[in-house]
Amino acid sequence: MKQFFSDFSKLIKFRLTFLVVFSASVTFLIGSKIQVDRAILPQIDWNNWLILIVGGFLVTGAANCFNEIIEKDLDKLMSRTKDRPMPAGRMTTGQGLVLGLIMGMAGTWLLGKLNLETGLISVFSILLYAFAYTPLKRKSPIAVFVGAIPGALPPLIGYLAALGKTTVFSAVDYQIAGILFLVQFVWQFPHFWSIAWVLDDDYKKAGFRLLPTKKRDKTSAVFTFVSTLVLIPVSLLPTFYGFGGYYIAGVSVLAGLLFSWYGYQLVVKMDLPSARKVMFCSFFYIPLVQLVLLFDLIV
């Protein structure tokens, strides 16, 4: 049983799935608070919040499962992935496919119960991640751009899920949801590229080309650094558009400056320790700014 849970965790990439679901659940609460403060909803619907968490977990797990089915033979080549259940031979691709389909259909059905937009975006996310981003990883660094789209959809899904089936919402809701998407979209680039820098030796074994120039060089480091700089003004959009306060602005600037400092150090030193600092900073950045925004909303 212990092996089963270990294999299932690797199959769905549990830590990645947790981060995705966390992002969606926080932005659900952001959207819900806005609707409650505008007297459109009487209170936060915690049942819908749980549906979003379970549905989001299943949909993300399905996308990761399909990714591993497609990359099974490539995963055998890399140290960090060769012990996943399918490349290690503890699970067949048929079993993985059945699990992926069950999780995908169940998760989409649950998210579709919240509203049509949430269900449709979840399907789009699976298709884009598994069948566009995954094969592109061996062809071109443009894969990072493509992968950043499904990677940034969780806050959009979470916010729209908060609207439920109500028809009493305005274009402002889509504007807010779009900004939440944009912040996470821009964040994806230093996040992806720092991981690609750290794991480049392993990625090369499978032919993955994720760094901007396909190698660890000054240009790739500069791209990573510049993307952290772009994130700073983008992170100020909630305050600029009036639904975030000054606390979120201050935290976003400070976190962005720290992120950029690590990015600059990567340009200067071009070494693995610097890349790891950028990578670990990226892990904390999104949860931090989303949680601060949740408690610093202005409606």
Image: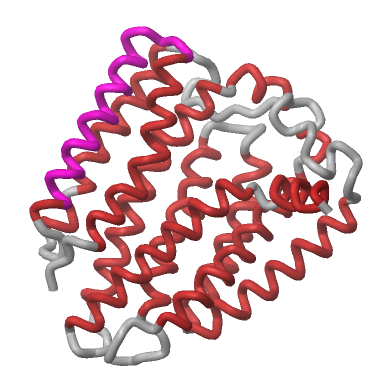
Task: Look at 18% across and 81% down and name the residue there.
Answer: 37
Q: Along the line of sight, which residue is nearer the eye, 153 or 2? A: 2
Task: Look at 53% across and 32% down and name the residue there.
Answer: 141
Q: Along the line of sight, which residue is nearer the eye, 1 or 279? A: 1
Magenta region: 248-272
Q: Along the line of sight, which residue is nearer the eye, 22 or 145? A: 22
Task: Look at 25% across and 81% down and name the residue there.
Answer: 35
Answer left or right for 221 relative to 88.
left
Q: Position of residue 266 (x, y in %)?
A: 36, 16
Q: Quadrant of residue 49?
A: bottom left
Q: Is residue 229 above or below residue 274?
A: below
Answer left or right for 44 relative to 209.
left
Q: Position of residue 265 (x, y in %)?
A: 31, 15
Task: Look at 17% across and 52% down and name the residue there.
Answer: 248
Extreme residue in the top direction: 269
Extreme residue in the front direction: 2
Quarter of the image for the C terminus: give it: bottom left
Quarter of the image for the N terminus: give it: bottom right
257 drawn magenta:
yes
Q: Is residue 102 above or below residue 116?
A: above
